[in-house]
Amino acid sequence: MKLLRLVPDDTKFGFMRFRSWSFPFSAFASIVSVVAFLWLGMNVGIDFKGGTVVELQAKSERADIAQIRERATNLNLGDVEVQEFGGPRDVLLRVGLQDGGDKAQAEVVVKLRQAFESAYEFRKVEVVGPRVSQELVQNGTIGVLLAIVTILIYLWFRYEWQFAVGAVIATMHDLVLVIGFYAVTQIQFDQTSIAAILTVIGYSLNDTVVVYDRVRELLRKYKKIKLFELLDLSMNSTLPRTVITSVTTILALIALSILGGDAIWGFCIALLFGVLVGTYSSIFVAAPILIYLGVRVGEGVGAEKAGDKTAPAPAR
Amino acid sequence: MFRQSTLKSALIVFTLFFGAYLTLPTVLGPQVVRTLSAYLPSFMVPKGSVKLGLDLQGGVHVMLEVDRAGLNRDLVRQLQEDVRRVLRNERVAPTGGIVAQNRGVAVRILDADGRRRVLPKLQELAQPISNAILGQTGQRNLEVVDQGDGLVTLTITDAEINDKIGRAVNQSIEIFRKRLDPEGVKEPVIQRQGLDRIVVQMPGASNSKDITDVLQPGKLEFRMVAEPGAPAAEIEQLPSVDDGGQPLAVERRVLVRGEDLISAEPGFDQRTSEPVVNFRFNVRGAQAFAAATTANVGKPFAIILDNRIISAPRIISPITQGQGQISGRFTVEAANRLAILLRSGALPASFTLVEERTVGPGLGRDSIEAAKLASTVSAVAIIAFSIATYGIFGVIALVALVANVMLIFALMSALGSTLTLPGIAGIVLTVAMAVDSNVLIYERIREEQAAGRGAALALDAGFTRALATILDANITTFLAGAILYLVGTGAIKGFAVTLCLGIVTTIFTAFTLTRIMVAAWYRWFKPKVVPI
């Protein structure tokens, strides 16, 4: 049987040469992300800003948006956003935080139910009070930071500091770009987005670690080779794996985002973007940056850890 | 090459069978488990199945928080009563009354002699706080300070407030359970969260009102309706439960409280066949009620729930048997609810809803369908791609993948974890990472072979070298997942659980199952070249 090869054997791409455009490109993308974040801001969901979201489905053939809007306005709940969503029977109602704290907040659903329960099925109700939303913001931020720090400490113990720093820079790059993605697309940013961000970080680091493992192995093997040649060799020899794994993950994510329903659509799209960025950053950011971090061929970077698991072990 | 000890292989196979066995209840459903338990000794029947999260099966999730300010107010009011009692006993009159403050009370006693007598008695009000776990904590519930100029302040300490909140939450959990699930069949999840919160999850419910209805404190009191000319300090105006009802002046003094009830059952009035609640007092309640009704025949008394008057019937004759009836134009449902409320006792504090997430049964069903379809399609895509890329080795990867997913479900069953929609996303991501582990191994084998090694050496070196990378790569993701689990709530936690379990099972299958299968294949075919 003829097997499928996405990447031909013995590729000899000069990946490191690309750094003259990949670095400016990454810097540009990062700046765009930061500007988008500051200028456009995030489409923050009720998880982080508090409020009420109700998903209604008409018991009749169609939802009457105009009527819903009118009745919702008469309820005196302040800003009510009525939005078509999914099929013609589905409507999404967003109500902002109420003055008067948690009690007034809890009243919103009671009022909405009185107004709409006869004609609509309440498919989903979410209420987040002002203090809970603040806590969720806090926990989310702490979670992301803690995760990054923990991973870095692990990498620092496992590798030399240059690799750890390289991994940090690549990870920050991905983090900034994913946040920029949320700002540019205005996909709702909620608790699952935090999960998406951390997953992207995990995936990207995973990819970076695979590449770095190979760099370290080759550093031990070759003593008389230019660093950028060695990096190119590492990239090329891990390229089939990088491509095959990305393709598999992307296939799975595409299926999930098309068929998985509205609840996880945003999550999957962000992951798709993140997987692409993570793969790119491992090759075009994490690896070439080692050149600037003072990794030298033949100077024994990695040698101190010779004899660990990556050395050929006797056949068992 | 690849000589695995038989014992090791047996252990791996056993693990897989045990995993499959643990997933039986999830795959086959509770019916089969019941049938099994009829034929097998109980310890051999697997029990736990993977529970579906509320986002998949539909239900109500609410988070409730103790009303701290309200509890504080109650404590201050109680303190005011205590101080009043002390002053009355010592026959000392404060100047300007007993003033309620934010966190305590203040009294001004200008009479120096009186102050000297009262102060030690007030000091006695300050009791050490004892704790079931720590015993005496050394902290007191009150700080009594003589401020000079005859002013004495009594301040409730933080330790006291926190202690009371903790107790209130624990008691309320029990009461909620009795109220939400009087027959003990609905299995709601009712858990404390943090110091002052309770999470209630009610599978199958579709309206949070079912839960918020039982949030009311349920404080029942019997008091006399105030007679004309009663001193203003001893009466208060209370509203009626009916929206149209007139507020009524009632005495502050409580004849009997709800805590003296020993039963409350819904029923019907014999004459009017109106729904009512029949109740019975314990001995103490019966005696108090008998004394009060004997002394006040012909006068009206008020039945008060949570400071609202349900009804104010006239005492026709003394009630000495300790039995009675509450009527108040109830519907059958309302009478039933009131009976449950009274039976379970009053809540020690009031609660506010701070978070709600409700998923209707329709959406839950749709989500399961969508997740099934998406998982199937992505599985087919991965299968096709793997076999196209690696042929026979792709098949091996897929067997490992199936074992992997099965082990995730086995672990989830054993740990009693809940499968949520984000959890399914976590499993899909695991599948991708599991494929990655196989890709790492296979690509390494290719490289080793390309570097001129024979089949046996290439296979061996491929596994050995790739495994180090797999471990490194997975540990980093695992760390991210573990942190997510620790700090995350709800959706995030569900995702983190399957991600972390998935990494554990991925490492297991990559290190063991894939290796055994490749070794078996090699021994069977003895190939010169690995077709990869």
Image (spheres, coloured by chain):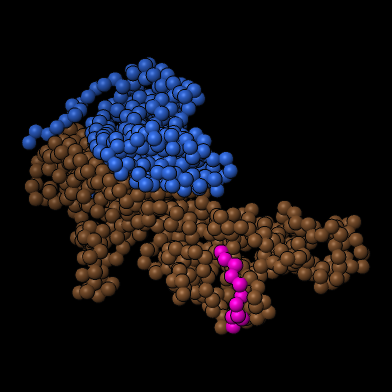
In the image, residue B284 lies in the stretch drawn in magenta: no
Q: Position of residue B469 (x, y in %)?
A: 31, 41
* Chain in blue in the render: A
- Image quadrant where residue A245 sits: top left
Q: A305 above or below B519? A: above
- Asked whether the viewer can see residue A159, the reply is no
Classify residue A264 as left or right of residue B271. left
Classify residue B140 as left or right of residue B47. right
From which residue to which does the magenta span run?
B310-320
Could you say which is closer to the camera, residue B478 or residue B41? B41
The C terminus of chain B: image quadrant: top left
Residue drawn 48% across the image and 64% down it: B330
Could you say which is closer to the camera, residue A266 or residue B369? B369
Classify residue A110 as left or right of residue B405. right
Could you say which is closer to the camera, residue B503 or residue B248? B248
Residue drawn 39% across the image and 19% down it: A25
In the image, residue B313 lies in the stretch drawn in magenta: yes
- Image quadrant where residue A185 sits: top left
The chief SS type of the magenta part is loop
Q: B336 above or below A189? A: below
Q: Position of residue B99 (x, y in %)?
A: 78, 57
- Image quadrant where residue B25 sits: bottom left
- Asked whether the viewer can see residue B513, the reply is yes
Residue drawn 54% across the image and 58% down it: B242
Q: A143 above or below B197? A: above
Q: Position of residue A14 (x, y in %)?
A: 29, 20
Residue drawn 32% across the image and 57% down it: B51
Give the total of numbered labels: 0
Could you say which is closer to the camera, residue A220 or residue B522? B522
Q: B250 above or below B458? A: below
* Chain in brown in the render: B
